[in-house]
Amino acid sequence: MYDPVPPDSPARRIGAWALIAAAVGVAAVAFGYVGGWLAPQRLTPDKLIDQFQDNAGTFAGYRRNHAKGVCVTGYFDSNGRAQAYSTAQVFAPGRTPVVGRFAIPGSNPYAPDSSVPIRSMALRFALANGQQWRTGMNSMPVFPVATPQAFFAQLQAQRPDPATGKPDPTKLAAFFAAHPETAAFRAWAKTAKPSASFATESYWSLNAFVFVDASGKRQPVRWRMTPEATDGDAGSTGGADYLAADLAERLTQGPLRWHLQVTLANPGDPTNDATKTWPDDRRTIDAGTLVLERTEPQDSGPCRDINYDPLILPAGIAASDDPLLPARSAAYADSYLRRTSEEAHLPGSAAPSAETKR
Ligand code: HEM
């Protein structure tokens, strides 16, 4: 076909440059949007993590929340009962290796274990088909807030007043008055005591997820780990680091066990609101036993370079519509990037291996 504009004409060259400039412009706007620069009021993972650091200080190389913890290893022994609801290979009868981490919430890795009544359990299941399931659970049955924005507002309200070193009670009261959805958590917190052991706690997923069966049928669920050890086994509470000492002591006597309890939602149960528990009569299945055999320090153990991102899920388990889930995933990635880039600059520290780095 005849083209009236010669290939090397100025008009054609200007057109080409205009196209390139437009493409660069579109890319810049896209980056600006994702980075939050175009809407400074928008909540970004960076802002959330900055707020953790603003509240407690920056502890190089440590997780920005749940900074104090220990690694654990063992396996999950599935009894096959969850297979009717999920195709995830971890639910076929048999064992799946697990690398986990116990921790306490907060950004200070030197905080005394008695400083908070909450303990956490994070697990990475390495399925035989190469897929993974990562989950982070807390030892309370309900979360204080339902949205990332409310979580951010809570962090801001908890910021220590420089004059007292403690959160300003007026700001906290204003936050709670503006967030009545925190009532169930506050009722729990009123009587909650810091436990003497990681081993005697139950750990809740809090967020809802979706099990998918072989026919593609979707069943909203929440899960929790319930311990075989009871309060009667309570260990030492001396010193600031009694949780790690108690765990190591118990494991010299033999493995510790929890049962994976999966609760099935009824139609209409809320899946997008971690401040609302489901009624007690919901069907719950025992899917198998978590067996933990060994503990190691977090700076040299196998959990060090794992980001327990709750959205790393195998086929057969999917995210729900809970808005906390994508916010957690993004914030954990930001925390991970900060701590691993700091570690890389510490003299004598080994760089994360390619296998575990993500
Ligand atoms: C928007 C809400 C939330 C934010 C911004 C947030 C933020 C964080 C951050 C930054 C970390 C450190 C991650 C890392 O560096 O590996 C963390 C750890 C953790 N979070 Fe959250 N979190 C949120 C909600 C929740 C909820 C709903 C749960 C429910 C169980 C939870 C459980 C945990 C646990 C268990 C850990 C410790 C993981 C580990 O041991 O490595 N978080 N959180």
Image (cartoon, grey):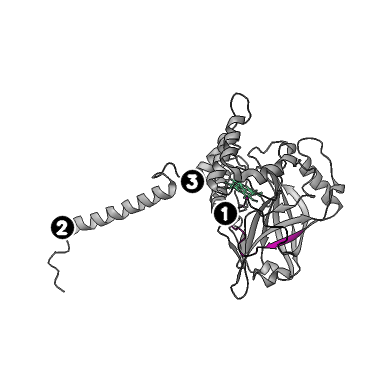
Decide: marks 3, 2 in contact (CB < 8 A)?
Answer: no
- First-in-chain label (3 vs 1): 3
Dividing the picture into quarters, in which one does residue 51 lie? top right
Marker count (numbered): 3
Judged by depth in the image, the label closer to the viewer, 2 or 1, is: 1
- Please tell me whether mark 2 sits on a helix, a strand or a loop: helix
- First-in-chain label (3 vs 2): 2
For the residues marked 3 and 2, what is the alpha-carbon distance in whole angstroms?
43 Å
Q: Disc 3 marks which amino acid? A: Thr
The C terminus - image quarter: bottom right
The span shown in magenta is 259-275
**Magenta residues, dominant SS class:** loop
Looking at the image, the residue that sits furthest to the left is 4
Q: Which residue is mark 3?
A: 44
Decide: marks 3, 1 in contact (CB < 8 A)?
Answer: no
- Say which of 346 and 99 sits in front: 99
Decide: marks 2, 1 in contact (CB < 8 A)?
Answer: no
For the residues marked 2 and 1, what is the alpha-carbon distance in whole angstroms?
51 Å
What residue lies at 55% left-to-right and 44% top-to-bottom? 150
Disc on res. 325: 1
Judged by depth in the image, the label closer to the viewer, 3 or 2, is: 3
Q: Which residue is mark 2?
A: 11
13 sits left or right of 27 in the view: left
Disc on res. 274: none
**Where in the figure is residue 6, as x and y percent of width and height?**
14, 64
**Where in the figure is residue 329, as x and y percent of width and height?**
56, 53
Would you place residue 157 above or below residue 298 in this image?
Answer: above
- Please tell me whether mark 3 sits on a helix, a strand or a loop: loop
Looking at the image, the residue that sits furthest to the top is 163
- Say which of 4 and 150 sits in front: 150
Asked whether 46 falls inside the magenta stretch, the response is no
Q: Disc 2 marks which amino acid? A: Ala
